Image (cartoon, rainbow, N blue to C red):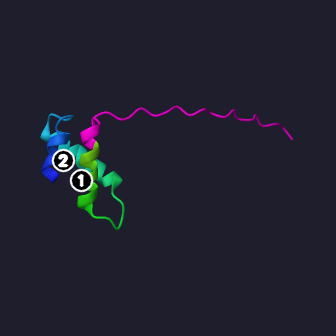
């Protein structure tokens, strides 16, 4: 049930208003066409149970390849 998902997500977010704002933003970004919006919302709340939605996950730094210098023709 969705209420179980909401109460689980509240373990990481203490403010219900903030939880609603974060969930709506995440649902808009993760929603795929031809799927139910309710399923996407449930998926978002499920993700919020396991991680803190207020902080972005750190990105892995990618190795930059050296760029060749242009030579005059």
The quadrant of the rendering that contains the C terminus is top right
The quadrant of the rendering that contains the N terminus is bottom left
Measuring from the top left, give residue 10's x and y in whole percent. Answer: 16, 38
The residue lying furthest to the bottom in this view is 34
Residue 68: quarter of image: top right
Residue 63: quarter of image: top right
Is residue 54 covered in magenta?
Answer: yes
Tags 2 and 1 touching, CB below 8 Å: yes
Q: Is residue 65 left or right of 13 when viewed as pictured?
A: right
Q: Give the mark nearer the N terminus: 2 vs 1.
A: 2
Circle 1 crowding by C-alpha within 10 Å: few under 14, some 14–19, many from 20: some
Q: Which of 45 and 24 is in front in this view?
A: 45
Marks 2 and 1, Cα distance to the nearest angstrom? 7 Å
Q: Main secondary structure of the magenta part?
A: loop
Q: Nearer the viewer, residue 7 or 41?
A: 7
- Rendered residue at 12%/49% (across/down): 3
Q: Is residue 32 left or right of 59 when viewed as pictured?
A: left
- Rendered residue at 41%/32% (across/down): 58
Query: Any mark on residue 53, and which?
Result: none
Query: Any mark on residue 5, and which?
Result: 2
Circle 2 crowding by C-alpha within 10 Å: few under 14, some 14–19, many from 20: some
Tell me: residue 47, above or below residue 59: below
Please, what secondary structure does the residue beneath circle 2 have?
helix
Magenta residues span 48-73
Measuring from the top left, give residue 55's x and y in whole percent. Answer: 31, 33
- Rendered residue at 49%/33% (across/down): 60
**Residue that mark 1 sits on:** 42
Q: How many labels does the image show?
A: 2
């Amino acid at each position: 049930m969705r209420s179980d998902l909401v109460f689980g997500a509240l373990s990481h977010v203490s403010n219900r208003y903030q939880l609603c704002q974060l969930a709506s933003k995440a649902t808009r970004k993760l929603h795929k066409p031809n799927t139910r919006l309710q399923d996407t919302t449930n998926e978002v709340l499920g993700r919020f149970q396991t991680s803190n939605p207020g902080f972005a996950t750190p990105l892995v730094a990618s190795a930059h390849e050296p760029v060749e210098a242009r030579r005059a023709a």
